[in-house]
Image: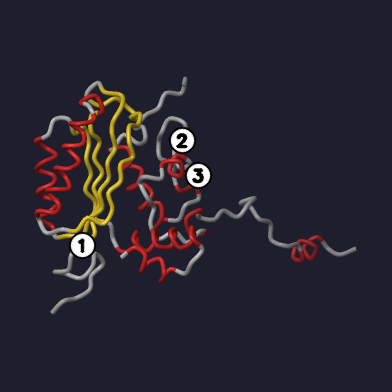
């Protein structure tokens, strides 16, 4: 019996978000390969990429490994638990990834973002949901 | 002339708090506090980068729990400082 819990319906794909801080000194090509590799891992595990953003080069609030700048990338995806295990494994191996985070984005955040989108375009929330799909 | 006690009874209750404080997140009916919104989160930290208490910020218990988690996640990603210098 499937029971709806706080974190969603069991067995159903979940909505995750991952943010990675890459060392900006390794060059544009190397950064690109890392980003593509992350997307590859997600798609290989039959997960669906919903949104991929590159925030670009940013100054870090504090130096990490004696580096003051980092390249921020965020990917939102829908999939099962095995995806983020594979992701974290890859993040650990790669030295040029300074920091990473994989978080479960619950339905509340999705609603919040829909509401923001709806208010920006001045349309009702239901229409914004259709736009997202 | 009315006795002292009677005068006091008719007085309206004094507001000892000065100003009624309300939770900033409750006011806008926030469902989720985003860790990427550092401009917003910075308002709930001190000059040194420490998280403000509920007593000072007036945030409700539910949102304070979410806020603390968001600030800690932002710190981990180096979006916000753990400690910032006073002399900047």
Question: Which chain hosts label 1?
Answer: A
For label 1, the residue is A14
Judging depth in this view, the residue of A96 and B19 nearest the camera is A96
Tell me the crowding category of disc 2: few under 14, some 14 to 19, or many 20 or more residues within 10 angstroms, Cα based.
few
Tag in front: 3 or 2? 2
| Residue B56, label in figure | 3
Q: Which x, y percent locates residue A126?
A: 41, 71
Tag in front: 3 or 1? 1
Q: CA distance from mark 1 to mark 2?
A: 36 Å
Q: Is residue A73 above or below residue A15?
A: above
SS at mark 1 in the image:
strand
Question: Which chain hosts label 2?
Answer: B
Q: CA distance from mark 3 to mark 2?
A: 10 Å
Q: Which x, y percent locates residue B27?
A: 52, 59
| Labelled pair 3, 1 in contact (Cβ < 8 Å) | no
**Residue at the spot x=50%, y=59% of the render?**
B28
Q: Which x, y percent locates residue B70?
A: 34, 47
Judging depth in this view, the residue of A74 and A63 nearest the camera is A74
Q: Is residue A129 above or below residue B25?
A: below
Tag in front: 1 or 2? 1
Question: Which chain hosts label 3?
Answer: B
Q: Quadrant of residue A1?
A: bottom left
Tell me the crowding category of disc 3: few under 14, some 14 to 19, or many 20 or more residues within 10 angstroms, Cα based.
few
Q: Which x, y percent locates residue B59?
A: 47, 52
For label 2, the residue is B46
Judging depth in this view, the residue of A121 and A93 nearest the camera is A121
What number of labels is visible?
A: 3
Q: Are marks 3 and 2 on the same chain?
A: yes
């Amino acid at each position: 019996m499937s029971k709806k819990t706080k974190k969603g319906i069991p067995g159903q794909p979940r909505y995750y978000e991952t943010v990675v801080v890459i060392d900006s000194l390794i060059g544009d090509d190397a950064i690109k390969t890392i980003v593509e590799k992350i997307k590859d891992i997600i798609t290989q595990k039959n997960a669906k990429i919903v949104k991929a953003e590159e925030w670009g080069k940013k100054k870090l609030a504090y130096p990490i490994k004696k580096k003051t700048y980092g390249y921020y990338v965020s990917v939102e995806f829908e999939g099962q638990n095995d995806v983020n295990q594979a992701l974290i494994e890859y993040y650990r191996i790669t030295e040029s990834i300074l920091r990473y985070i994989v978080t479960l984005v619950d339905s509340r955040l999705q609603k919040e973002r829909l509401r923001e989108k709806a208010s920006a375009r001045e349309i009702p929330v239901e229409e914004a949901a259709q736009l997202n799909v | 002339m009315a006795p002292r006690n009677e005068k006091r009874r008719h007085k309206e209750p004094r507001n000892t708090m000065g100003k009624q404080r309300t939770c900033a997140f409750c006011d806008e009916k926030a469902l989720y506090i985003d860790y990427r919104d550092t401009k917003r989160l910075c308002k709930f930290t001190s000059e040194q980068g420490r998280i403000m208490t509920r007593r000072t910020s007036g945030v409700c218990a539910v949102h304070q729990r979410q806020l603390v988690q968001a600030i800690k996640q932002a710190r981990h990603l180096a979006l916000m400082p753990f400690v910032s210098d006073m002399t900047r």
